[in-house]
Image (cartoon, rainbow, N blue to C red):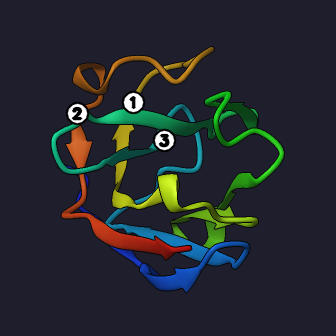
Amino acid sequence: QVQLVESGGGSVQAGGSLRLSCAASEYTGSSYCMGWFRQAPGKEREGVATIYTGGGFTYYADSVKGRFTISQDNAKNTLYLQMNSLKPEDTAMYYCAAVRRYCYEIGPAGTYNYWGQGTQVTVSS
């Protein structure tokens, strides 16, 4: 059972940056699909970015391409999401998720087995 703990959320003004971290309780450096999802009040949870840890392949939602970067540090069992040029519409609770399988896209939230508790990101205009 992989446990995931997010950190790094906060409040920023539009145009600012934040880096989210997701610490895993065990090694996820190979054969895991790890991703970031977000959920705003009254909206469905949506995929933001995913990385296949076995090869470093990354996938992004169109809404964040060119602004967000997902990465991994296998030595620290940590997943990151660097968020630049933040917009008010990026405001949401951000969740880290993982599943032990290959991934070639972000995929639905229901296909991920492990979830963190979430970290709030608020972007003001």
- Residue flagged by tag 2: what amino acid is it? Asn
Q: Which mark is residue 113?
A: 2
Is 57 on the left or on the right of 111, as rendered?
right
Under mark 3, the amino acid is Met
Instruction: Label 3: state its secondary structure.
Output: strand
Q: Nearer the viewer, residue 71 or 27?
A: 71
Residue ranking furthest to the right: 66
In the image, what residue occupies the spot 68% across and 28% down? Answer: 62
Q: Disc 1 marks which residue?
A: 100
Question: Of label 1 and label 2, which has the lower sequence position?
Answer: 1
In percent of width and height, residue 106 lies at 52, 24
- Label 1–label 2 contact, CB within 8 A: yes
Of residues 90 and 56, the one drawn nearer to the viewer in this rendering: 90
User: Which of label 1 and label 2 is nearer to you?
Assistant: 2
Q: Is residue 33 visible?
A: no
Q: Is the residue marked by circle 3 packed among few (<14), some (14-19), or many (20+) residues within 10 Å?
A: many
Pointers 3 and 2 in contact (CB under 8 A)? Answer: no
SS state under label 2: loop
Mark 1 or mark 3, which has the lower sequence index?
3
Question: Which residue sits at x=55%, y=19%?
Answer: 103
Residue at label 3?
34
Q: Amino acid at mark 1?
A: Arg
Q: Quadrant of residue 80?
A: bottom right
Give the class, few, some or many, for how many residues have Cα within 10 Å of label 1's Cα (few <14, many ≥20).
some
